[in-house]
Amino acid sequence: MHVVAATGLHQAVHYDDDTLAGLRGRLADVFVSELTEGIGASGVRAGVVKVAGGFHALDAHARWTMAAAAEAHHATGAAIAVHLELGTGALDVLDLLCGELGVPPHRVVLGHLNRSPDLVVHRQAAESGCYLAFDGPSHAHHATDWRMPDAVRALADAGFGDRVLLGADTTTAAARSVGGGPGMPYLLRRVRPRLVRAVGENLVGRILTENPGRAFAVEWR
């Protein structure tokens, strides 16, 4: 198993003002440094940049972080993963990253799409050539979790099975204490067989191996 660490920046609400002020004018440099040299003093290099959108919109903070992520991508080739708040704003993210900032769609991973099970938006996003990441179950999104296999099947039926990724998101013990999910093993123990019933063994195998291999692969410059 390959474990890929991320550099990046979440929504503004997760940081104090001093932290954000200290990153002004150098955020892209921080991303590039963590991709090419290492994260802090750990010696571990990140392999992907992760940033976040807002609920159905992109505020100034999201645009700043995505511009820095795009700059880091152009400098290194690394993929950009995007937290979609409650699964929304996918098309706005693509307009910014791919339309305005020149990131190739196949280097963008949109996350948490099943939190907003809009099959039309899912297909529009897939048509761009980006990757679409769906989550395993969580307390917070239990109301829509059951729709994930149908969303994956709809994309597969439309010919976009090679753009689908699967994750778990809130899986740590700390996250579970505030309403997270049952953990990564649940993806293989329960989610995988459920997806097999929806789209077949062959595609599920590709979703868990080949698709992420392509999505996160990079020839470091």
Image (spheres, grey):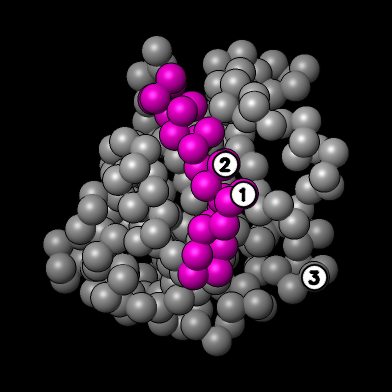
Q: Which residue is mark 3?
A: 178
Which residue in the protein does label 2 denote?
65
Does the rendering let one see residue 187? no
- In which quadrant of the rendered view does residue 85 lie? bottom right
Whether the magenta-drawn stretch holds residue 19 is answered as: no
Label drawn at residue 23:
none
Position of 219 with respect to 58 (left or right) is left
- Secondary structure of the residue carrying numbered label 3: loop
Foreground label between 2 and 3: 2
Instruction: Reply yes or no: does residue 67 show up in magenta.
Output: yes
The foreground one among 89 and 106 is 89
Do the CB atoms of the residues marked 1 and 2 lie less than 8 Å apart?
yes
Q: Position of residue 142 (x, y in %)?
A: 58, 82
Q: Kindly report the distance in space between the C-alpha atoms of the residues bearing marks 1 and 3.
A: 26 Å
Going by the numbered disc 2, the residue's amino acid type is Thr
Residue drawn at the location 44% of the way across and 65% of the way down:
89
Q: Quadrant of residue 32?
A: top right
Q: Are marks 1 and 3 in contact (CB under 8 Å)?
A: no
> Magenta segment, which residues?
52-77
Location of mark 1 (residue): 61
Q: Looking at the image, is mark 1 or mark 3 earlier in the sequence?
A: 1
